[in-house]
Amino acid sequence: MNKTISFGIPCYNSAEYMDHCITSILEGSDYASDVEVVIVDDGSTKDDTPSKADEWASRYPDLVKAVHQENGGHGIAVLSALKAAEGTYFKIVDSDDWLDGEALRQLLSRLRTFIGHDTRVDLVITNYVYEHVEDGKQNVVDYRYALHRGKIMTWDKIGHFNMTQNLLMHSLCYRTDVLRAGGIPMPPHTFYVDNIYAYVPLPRCKTLYYLDVDLYRYFIGREDQSVNETVMISRIDQQLRITRIMMDAYHLYDDVDSPKLRSYMIGYFTLMMAVCSVFSRMSDKPDAMENCEALWEHLKRYDKRMYRRARMGAVGTATNLPTKVGEKFTIGIYRVAQKLVKFN
């Protein structure tokens, strides 16, 4: 590894906004020689994404790689970027998002210190910001009180994560060898794989560090965006698929040694099951509820303790109320959470 960090940028028909993303990394890092950008053209056909990727690689051959592949979806593009990466650390940035320059410089300084002192840190966590471009509003997600700032720690030293503080892809910077060591079970042609990326590798991370800077800027506003509510409801089958992969990755009470990490992961997984329950109720697909109930039954057979925690707790109960009145109450809870967190 001769780079401090590799930034993977999956691109699919991204010509309209990918330049902003790439520029934010190169300018934010002051075009540092130890930074690498891996642009993955995921079989784009509707615009000049492929040629843009090649232009960037031609302009900055020591800093930028262009990888072209047949269309495989976001998860396969992430894996392609990971395969090509030469950095000790690895971070994914979606092509319509961007990084804050000053925060990036602070991240790079910290990573260089770890590497220079031969200090192994498997996961570096930073804040992210929901950028609601339409109304100009921002919502910062930080990890204060859940994590000690500026200290290397193990999972046993973490605090309580509230429901707005899940460690999403936007906040994570992994050591590359951690991701490669056990693989990431990314299905092709499936959205919402970022949940797998932010969940499955966590038990492999033995040390972590929280850098309290607002690094990642998460664009919210396009009608075709995967987190748009209408789009999410229409893709409920993909949400169910992702959640099942997460479920099958671990028997959490048997496979995860740290009680605090286990508690965090069961909380994250419970929210994923809740999302499946809510959007299945909002879907007009005739088999949506049947498929959701089948997922719950699979969980019950797979691991009774995980099932009891996910289904019988407050979140599971509130999002699976029977009768039409219960269904309206469940959707109402989702609406309140949506307004508070502004996640789509």
Image: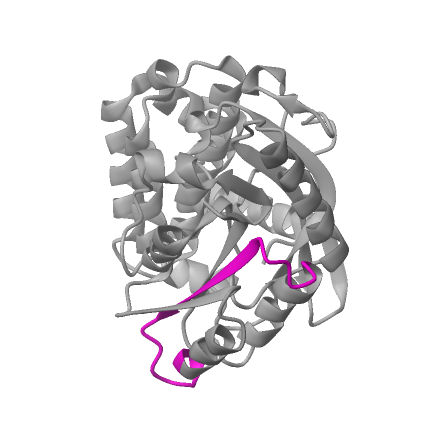
Q: Is residue 288 above or below residue 284?
A: above
Q: Residue at x 34, y 14 (%)?
A: 254
Q: Is residue 41 magenta?
A: yes
Q: Is residue 282 magenta?
A: no
Seen from the viewer's position, the closer of residues 22 and 285 is 22
Q: Viewed as shown, does residue 214 lie left or right of 227?
A: right
Q: Residue at x 57, y 55 (%)?
A: 35
The answer to whether residue 332 is visible is yes
Q: Viewed as shown, does residue 2 lie left or right of 31?
A: left
Provide the residue span drawn in magenta.
29-50
In which quadrant is the C terminus drawn? bottom right
Measured from the top left, where is residue 320 in percent x and y?
Answer: 43, 36
Q: Residue at x 41, y 37 (%)?
A: 177
In which quadrant is the N terminus drawn? top left
The answer to whether residue 324 is visible is no
Q: Residue at x 63, y 40 (%)?
A: 111
Q: Is residue 201 above or below residue 235?
A: above
Measured from the top left, where is residue 197 in percent x and y?
Answer: 42, 43
